[in-house]
């Protein structure tokens, strides 16, 4: 049984971290039994054993791995007899997807939902969340999120490479879903779980693909709690 430390909101069942979702999809893909432990932003002592302060963190026997990318690599190396997440070539290609998700997709989503996030984080995390994010943005959460109705079209246009890649193809992984799909879909679970604002269009190749990902692994993503 692998233990996963997974970001939770005020509602312990609301699990919304874009990075933890990448790991959860990866674990489900490999069919590895997981014990998911709720973690809050201010629970840094609970993952101090990992030598850093962010989730996801997994404990697999005596092995501790943090960082969603490192976890995916570890899982493929350690469990080669379970469905592969990428293999050497897939891993090399997914590195670009991971970099794109972290540097374009995720920051783009943040400006659409960051004030909504404040409403779902645990009470004890609220001051930390506001202060740390406002320092990062140099503006209040309200200012960052303001005007999202006018900005969402530009955000959706920024997803053109994803839309084109998925046109007429079932998965970013090709004939089968791979960790590339988990990276992008995991990131999209973040707005899905925390906000009623429609970051992605309701139709088109991206919505159709995301619907397929939500149905994977027994509807694991679709059945996750949302606000
Ligand atoms: N590069 C890391 C990023 C992990 C990360 O930033 N996780 C967030 C949760 S979504 C976190 O733990 N944040 C702690 C904080 O902001 O204090 C990964 O891919 O796992």
Image (tube, helix red, strand yellow):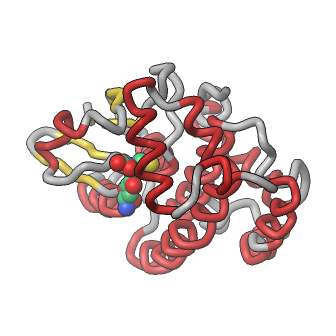
Q: How many marks?
A: 0
Q: Which residue shows up at 44% across the image and 42% down it?
A: 129
Quadrant (top left/top right/bottom left/bottom right) for the N terminus: top left
Q: Which residue shows up at 68% across the image and 40% down it?
A: 192
Which of the two residues, 21 or 220, is positioned nearer the viewer here? 21
Residue 189 horizontal side relative to residue 78, left or right: right
Residue 139 horizontal side relative to residue 82, left or right: right
In the rendered image, which quarter is residue 36 located in?
top left
Residue 193 location (% of width, % of height): 63, 35
In the rendered image, which quarter is residue 181 located in?
bottom right
Q: Can you name the residue that lies furthest to the right here?
A: 203
Which of the two residues, 120 or 211, is positioned nearer the viewer here? 120
Q: Which residue shows up at 23% across the image and 40% down it?
A: 44
Residue 91 horizontal side relative to residue 106, left or right: left
Which of the two residues, 76 or 135, is positioned nearer the viewer here? 135
**Residue 68 can be seen, yes or no:** no
Residue 53 location (% of width, % of height): 25, 49
**Residue 153 can be seen, yes or no:** yes
Q: Which residue shows up at 48% across the image and 44% down it?
A: 130
Residue 73 location (% of width, % of height): 32, 63
Residue 79 location (% of width, % of height): 29, 52
Residue 210 horizontal side relative to residue 35, left or right: right
Quadrant (top left/top right/bottom left/bottom right) for the C terminus: top right
Q: Taking 141 as reference, is 34 above or below it? A: above
């Amino acid at each position: 049984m692998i233990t996963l430390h997974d970001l939770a909101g005020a509602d312990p069942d609301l699990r919304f971290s874009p990075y933890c979702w990448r790991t959860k999809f990866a674990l489900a893909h490999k069919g590895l039994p997981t014990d998911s432990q709720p973690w809050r932003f201010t629970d840094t002592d609970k993952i101090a054993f990992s030598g850093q302060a962010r989730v996801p963190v997994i404990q697999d026997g005596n092995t501790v791995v943090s960082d969603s990318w490192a976890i995916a690599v570890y899982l493929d190396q350690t469990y080669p007899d379970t469905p592969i997440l990428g293999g050497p070539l897939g891993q090399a290609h997914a590195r670009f997807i991971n970099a794109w998700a972290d540097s374009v997709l995720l920051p783009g989503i943040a400006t659409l939902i960051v004030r909504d996030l404040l409403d779902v984080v645990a009470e004890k995390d609220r001051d930390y969340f506001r202060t740390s994010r406002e320092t990062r943005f140099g503006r209040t959460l309200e200012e960052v999120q303001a005007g999202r109705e006018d900005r969402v079209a530009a955000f959706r246009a920024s997803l053109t490479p994803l839309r084109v890649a998925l046109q007429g193809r079932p998965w970013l992984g090709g004939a089968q879903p791979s960790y590339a799909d988990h990276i992008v879909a995991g990131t999209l679970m973040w707005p899905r779980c925390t906000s009623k604002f429609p970051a992605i269009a309701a139709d088109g190749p991206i919505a159709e693909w995301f619907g397929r990902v939500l149905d994977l692994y027994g509807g694991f993503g679709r059945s996750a709690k949302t606000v």
